Image (cartoon, rainbow, N blue to C red):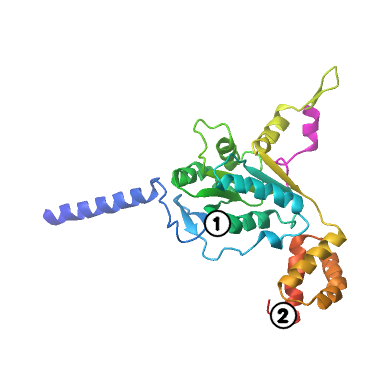
Amino acid sequence: MNEKFERLIERAEQLIGRIEAVLPRPMGAPDWNASVAFRYRKRAGGHGWLEPVRHVAQMRLVDLQEIDGQKAKIQRNTQQFVQGLPANNVLLTGARGTGKSSLVKACLNEYAPHGLRLIEVDKADLVDLPDIVDVVAGRPERFVVFCDDLSFEDGEAGYKALKSILDGSVSAASQNVLIYATSNRRHLLPEYMKENLSYTHTADGEVHPGEVVEEKISLSERFGLWVSFYPFSQDEYLAIVGQWLASFGVSPEDIETARPQALVWALERGSRSGRVAYQFARDYAGSHGVQG
């Protein structure tokens, strides 16, 4: 009898353990001294945690060329934020490879000594933003929640979660958290030709978008600061190539010699972006035995 009872207790404990494993539980705080950047991770079971980034990209603001206007806006907003002054959530949009995400990483390195921290969150995990905000609320650091290459399809859960945390939730956003997002789309949702039919025209010539278009615009409008990036001209591209080659230790004479090769590289890639310039510089420096 006792043996049967003990087996029953053991099975009950195993069952309780399995149930506890799938029940939602509060997200624990990481070791905040382990890094200046963290990445939100989530298991299939639904439990999320903040993982310290061991090797943070060593991007500097001075490394980013030909985007001085955009750099000034982001730097000013970030500086206000770390100083405890009012600052805006930021949406960086435009051509691929023009420095959007690099600028966010460079700002982290610039202002980390002043208390700035970064939490990278994938689009699929934006539904957990309220939990992340709860973990960092009350901390002395200032946190940028960073979502790279952000865009949504109709009906995605993360869309409404982000919309609520930006503006419109019953609970106020934490004063030590901002959202920085990059996207190739200004309005973050796909737009279709048929939606243009929903626009209405008034007698005095005003144009009013329909409900579907209004909904797609509303998320972008919740970002207080929009920063646009544009494709580089040939001269701008070559200037960026020169800057990256110099950072790898290539001599001025060799940089001048490398210009035609840099143009061919861009032609083969179909893009004169900052990313392509950096990739060419790495290839050139490596193939010519420059250690960097």
Tell me if residue 13 comes above or below residue 217 in the rendering.
Answer: below
Tell me if residue 136 comes above or below residue 98 in the rendering.
Answer: above
The answer to whether residue 194 is magenta is: yes
> Magenta segment, which residues?
184-198
Asked if residue 76 can be seen in this view, the reply is yes
Residue under pointer 2: 290
What is the crowding at mark 2: few (fewer than 14 residues within 10 Å), some, or many (at least 20)? some
- Quarter residue 262 falls in: bottom right
Give the residue drawn at x 79%, y 51%: 230
Query: Identity of the amino acid at label 1?
Result: Ala
Q: Position of residue 231 (x, y in %)?
A: 81, 54
Q: Earlier in the sequence, mark 1 or mark 2?
A: 1
Residue under pointer 1: 112
Overall secondary structure of the magenta stretch? loop
In the image, 136 versus 84, the foreground residue is 84
Q: Position of residue 193 (x, y in %)?
A: 80, 37
Give the residue drawn at x 77%, y 33%: 195
Which circle, 1 or 2, is nearer the viewer?
A: 1
> What number is the disc on residue 145?
none
